[in-house]
Image (cartoon, rainbow, N blue to C red):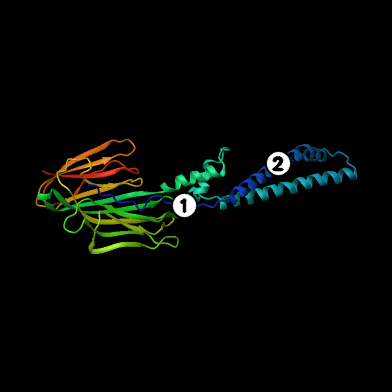
Amino acid sequence: MKISITNLFNRPKIYISQIDIRDWIRKGLLHLLLAYILVILGWLIHYKWKVEPLKADTQEEVKLSEADFENRDYHISFSASLAEDIIFFGIVGVIIFILTKRDGSELSLKERINRILLTNKNNNRSAKDYLFDQISPILAYNESSEISVELTQLKPDESLIKIYADVKHRILNMCSNDSFIIPKNTIGIESSYLVGLDYGTVYHASIKNEKPSVDASEDQIIIDSKPGIPLKTKIYEHPIRPFTISKNGAAIAQMSWSIWEKLDGNKDDDGFYISNKRFTNKIDLTVSNKTPQDLKITLELRHAKSGNRTIKTIELASERENVPFPIHKRLIPEDEIWLKFQTA
């Protein structure tokens, strides 16, 4: 039997303007810089070949005609005025550059990608848009995930164990000036074991911005019930409205439920599992045994990319609470965390 949680925090989308005026401004500034350099070179040539000889004639007291005097004064005055203009516009340009230069962390996603591809002439706008679409979904990740599992009740005659689980993700938006949009999605639980009249119970499901801001969505409290909502069918699903994580912000997504799971199962799919839907940097997993039976618990990390499994088994005595289960590997999308339960 499998319990799967459809990840509502999957496939975000950052909407990017198709028009980039800054490209035009950048090209215009480059042309102005080139013109400024040409003016400096022109002034140097003029000063070297015109002004310096005239100053030398003045120092040597060469007799000059009235026309020569006017020509000398014109060139010297023109050179001095041009030098002042070059210095003035150079200082103004440096000041404008300093004031308008932005730190890379303030750039939008489109600007960052354009900078990377700036020297590559083979990339057209359609290719860039495709690249933005591929990159935007991974610009938020599970900075930390907390998984708490409590084993609360046994049904030895049916080889079942009741599990209470609480999963909380801190989803971090890596962009400082782009909101992170989670599109319309669903959350869900799939179960196989009917005990009494129910397949399990859902107690809480929500997503909230850690620090609400103007550009963030309001908190979505999907379920919050102390007695819980009984699951009357094998598959439970609930729609989620689009949700926006604020710029440079984080969201807290949480879900808690209880369900029956196989005890002493031999099949590969006997076990409780959570499918990871985005890169997860840190996982804190704790297990509590509140049953009267000593148990052996096996943790399997099933790595989707390599197909390998990392396995660890611990003995958990009766009435032991909050025993940490170290997970040293970072998880990528489609990796799975499995827990299997056996009597000790």
Alpha carbons under labels 1 and 2: distance apart: 42 Å
Judging by the rendered image, the residue that carries numbered circle 2 is 38
Specify the quadrant that holds the C terminus: top left
Residue 321 shows in this picture: no
Which of the 4 image quarters holds residue 302? top left
Mark 1 vs 2, N-terminal side: 1
Residue 262 shows in this picture: yes
On residue 329, which mark appears? none
* Dot 2 alpha-carbon crowd within 10 angstroms: few under 14, some 14 to 19, many 20 or more: few
Instruction: Give x and y (percent) for residue 232.
Output: 24, 58
Q: Nearer the viewer, residue 311 or 173?
A: 311
Instruction: Give x and y (percent) for residue 329.
Output: 29, 41
* Dot 1 alpha-carbon crowd within 10 angstroms: few under 14, some 14 to 19, many 20 or more: some
Instruction: Give x and y (percent) for residue 281.
Output: 33, 45
Instruction: Give x and y (percent) for residue 103.
Output: 50, 49
Badge 2 element: helix
Give me the residue at 64% from left, 44% from top: 30
Q: Is residue 280 left or right of residue 38?
A: left
Which of the two discs, 1 and 2, sits closer to the camera?
Answer: 1
Judging by the rendered image, the residue that carries numbered circle 1 is 14
Task: Check the image and report above or below for 121 versus 258.
Answer: above
Task: Residue type at mark 2: give it.
Answer: Leu
Q: Is residue 10 left or right of residue 165?
A: right
Q: Nearer the viewer, residue 48 or 301?
A: 301
Badge 1 element: loop
Give me the residue at 67% from left, 48% from top: 87
Q: Is residue 296 left or right of residue 269?
A: left
Q: Nearer the viewer, residue 8 or 49?
A: 8
Task: Residue type at mark 1: give it.
Answer: Ile
